[in-house]
Image (cartoon, helix red, strand yellow):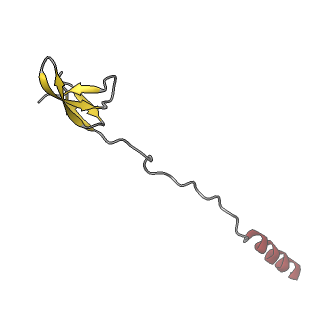
Amino acid sequence: MKILATLAVLLSFQVSQPTALPHPQAVQSSPAHVPHGKWYLAESGHAVYCYGPVKVVNDPLNGMQRVATFCKGDKAIVPLKD
């Protein structure tokens, strides 16, 4: 009986050894740099999302005109509806 008790105690010591758990990778909640833009109403009547500032430019045909810069899509400058 002593042998079984000794064997049980020895086995419990082997099982109770803590195992090293892998550390979870730090999850990044947001990307490092996310460009924040704003929605504008273009002169064509469509909504456009632009990242840059709104500027006033001198248009030879229409005179002074407000434009949004760095817009998503194929246009860098979009004339805005006033």
- Across and down, in percent, residue 73 comes to 33, 25
- Which quadrant of the view contains residue 36? top left
Q: In this rendered view, identify the residue nearer to me: 71 or 9.
A: 71
Q: In the image, what residue occupies the spot 18% across and 21% down?
A: 44
Q: From what the image shows, is residue 4 above or below residue 66?
A: below
Give the left or right position of residue 30, taking residue 20 as reference. left
Q: In the image, what residue occupies the spot 28% across and 33% down?
A: 49
Q: In this rendered view, identify the residue nearer to me: 79 or 41.
A: 79
> Total label count?
0
Q: In the image, what residue occupies the spot 31% across and 26% down?
A: 76
The residue at the far bottom in this view is 2
The residue at the far top in this view is 61
Q: From what the image shows, is residue 28 above or below residue 48?
A: below
Q: In the image, what residue occupies the spot 84% across and 75% down?
A: 7
Q: Quadrant of the C terminus?
A: top left
- Across and down, in percent, residue 51 comes to 30, 37
- Which quadrant of the view contains residue 72? top left
Q: From what the image shows, is residue 56 above or below residue 31?
A: above
Q: Quadrant of the N terminus?
A: bottom right
- Which quadrant of the view contains residue 16? bottom right
- Across and down, in percent, residue 47 comes to 22, 29
- Across and down, in percent, residue 37 comes to 29, 39
Give the left or right position of residue 17, taking residue 36 as reference. right
